[in-house]
Image (tube, grey):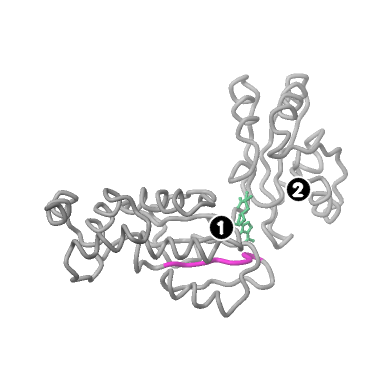
């Protein structure tokens, strides 16, 4: 059989969430399985009696290990790439390898299955017709607010992966930049403690303060439809946004969007 790189999706929690095809490929079709953490993946593979040579491929050795895997593919090996959970390449390593293989004409074969992104989106109750997946939000407040602001006007549901130790700060920034939009926090998907917290950034944060903030989570934000009801004079609203850390032009843009006004209107109202 000719060489191929299989991108195989694996469970995001519940071990039953793996396709019959994925199991066949991992068991019978490949020479080797590349995975992020060999000990972690061994548990899944043992569960399904799959005994194949494993090779580690993660963020820190992606470059040199990628070269080695590419050489193996050139020499006719069939290799499966899996990640610790879900679909490889989705906020996980593999992009470089898949791109290099495709460029060399080596078949790249997707074996679809779970991903936290679509699992969360479908059950969130938020519109699914258009969405933006932003991966992990930046860890620093300034960058995070900029990222949220940059998608503020997109007519799409926003989906992010977030770490438990950053979620309260992220919700503060969602509230600050996007206001009272519907927010859903999808936690521990497909696991025993799966739950969906629904509300606005403020009320979801309140719910989290009383629950624990551990576990894996996906943050979803509904598209901006309503403009914010705020009848304070524009200079006051802009001054508050600046006091909260925005640059002047950023604050003008932010208030313009909240009020459904043009940037020019707000700029003129706050410029003596
Ligand atoms: N490749 C994976 C996928 O297809 O979903 C994502 C890998 S990324 C490194 C890990 C992040 O995905 C977690 O921090 C969390 O935000 C999200 N995630 C993964 N499994 C999850 C689950 N069972 N419930 C909620 N979020 C999950």
Residue at point 40%, 49% (across, down): 146
Q: Is residue 92 above or below residue 176?
A: above
Q: In the figure, residue 221 lies in which quadrant? A: bottom left
Whether the residue under disc 1 has CB within 8 Å of ligand 1: yes
Residue at point 65%, 68% (across, down): 214
Residue hosting label 1: 162
Residue at point 33%, 61% (across, down): 243
Residue 10 magenta: no
Q: Position of residue 46 (x, y in %)?
A: 86, 53
In the shown orientation, is residue 186 left or right of residue 57?
Answer: left
In the shown orientation, is residue 161 left or right of residue 155?
Answer: right
Instruction: Give the magenta part as a residue range.
Output: 183-190
Under circle 1, the secondary element is: strand
Under circle 2, the secondary element is: helix
Mark 1 in CB contact with mark 2 (< 8 angstroms): no
Residue hosting label 2: 23
| Nearer to us in this view, 167 or 221 | 167
CA neighbours of label 1 inside 10 A, class few (<14), some (14 to 19), many (20+) = some
Q: Position of residue 91 (x, y in %)?
A: 59, 46
Main SS type for the magenta part?
strand
Q: Which quarter of the figure is the N terminus placed in? A: top right
């Amino acid at each position: 059989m000719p060489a191929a790189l299989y991108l195989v999706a694996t469970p995001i929690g519940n071990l039953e969430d793996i396709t019959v095809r994925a199991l066949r490929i991992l068991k019978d079709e490949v020479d080797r399985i590349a995975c992020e953490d060999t000990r972690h993946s061994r548990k899944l593979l043992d569960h399904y009696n799959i005994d194949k040579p494993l090779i580690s491929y993660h963020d820190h050795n992606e470059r040199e290990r990628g070269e080695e895997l590419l050489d193996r593919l050139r020499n006719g090996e069939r290799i499966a790439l899996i990640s610790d959970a879900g679909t490889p390449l989705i906020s996980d390593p593999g992009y470089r390898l898949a791109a290099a293989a495709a460029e060399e004409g080596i078949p790249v074969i997707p074996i679809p299955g779970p991903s936290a992104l679509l699992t969360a989106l479908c059950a969130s109750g938020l519109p699914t017709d258009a969405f933006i997946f932003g991966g992990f939000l930046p860890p620093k407040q300034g960058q995070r607010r900029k990222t949220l602001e940059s998608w503020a006007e997109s007519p799409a549901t926003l989906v992010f992966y977030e770490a438990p130790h950053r979620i309260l700060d992220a919700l503060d920034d969602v509230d600050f930049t996007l206001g009272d939009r519907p927010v859903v926090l999808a936690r521990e998907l497909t696991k025993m403690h799966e739950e969906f917290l629904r509300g606005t950034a403020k009320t979801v944060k309140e719910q989290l303060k009383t629950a624990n903030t551990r576990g894996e989570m996906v943050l979803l934000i509904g598209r901006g439809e309503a403009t914010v009801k705020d009848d304070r004079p524009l200079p006051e609203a802009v001054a508050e946004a600046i006091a909260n850390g925005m640059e002047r032009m950023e604050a003008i843009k932010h208030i313009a969007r909240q009020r459904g006004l043009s940037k020019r209107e707000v700029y003129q109202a706050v410029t003596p």
